[in-house]
Image (spheres, rainbow, N blue to C red):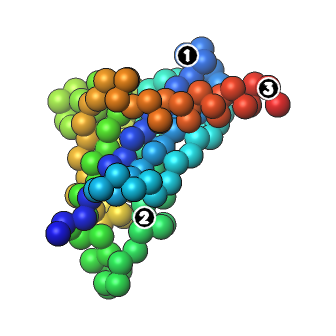
Amino acid sequence: MKKSLLVHTDGGARGNPGPAAIGVYITDEVGRELIKFGKTIGKMTNNQAEYRAIIEALEWIKNNLKFDLPARDQNRGLDIKIFLDSLLVVNQLNGLFKIKKKHLRDLIIQVRQREQETGGNVSYQFINRDKNKMADFLVNQALDSSISS
């Protein structure tokens, strides 16, 4: 059976730009939770935070999911399905929209590098915010915690 990861990511900023955070929620193909985390990432725009969430998710996968294979084959055959509620970012990552801003082009280069490093087959899909509740919750929890501390 081909292995799959279901990755829900979200990024947000209060103000645009403003204090920003990410949320990442990863399960396996049968819905078992592998990791969930939210954290603040400094002052950024919403779109920058969306990309940072994807980068952090791919970084976690690269560092934590290894199979008994040579390094170059670690996660070959692993489907990494990334779901997010930013239609703009999904369309940019899927090559449907141009990326005009340099700071976003720099982030997409980092995403592409992490995709290669995971060794998996990465895809991006837009979902409505109500289907991305855990990642959204993690973003807001991180932002609320940073404001109250």
Give how far apart the Cα atoms at labels 2 and 3 are: 33 Å
Instruction: Name the foreground residue: 108 vs 134.
Output: 134
Q: Quadrant of residue 38?
A: top right
138 relative to 32 in the view: left or right: right
Type of amino acid under label 1: Asn
Type of amino acid under label 2: Lys
Residue beneath disc 1: 16
115 relative to 17 in the view: left or right: left
Q: Quadrant of residue 88?
A: top left
Pointer 1 local density, CA inside 10 Å: few below 14, some 14–19, many at least 20: few
Kindly give the residue lying farthest to the right in the view shown: 149
Give how far apart the Cα atoms at labels 3 and 1 are: 20 Å
Residue beneath disc 2: 62
Type of amino acid under label 3: Ser
Mark closest to the chain's N terminus, 2 or 3: 2
Which element type, helix, strand or loop, lies under badge 2?
helix
Q: Which mark is residue 148?
A: 3
Q: Residue at x 53, y 30 (%)?
A: 137
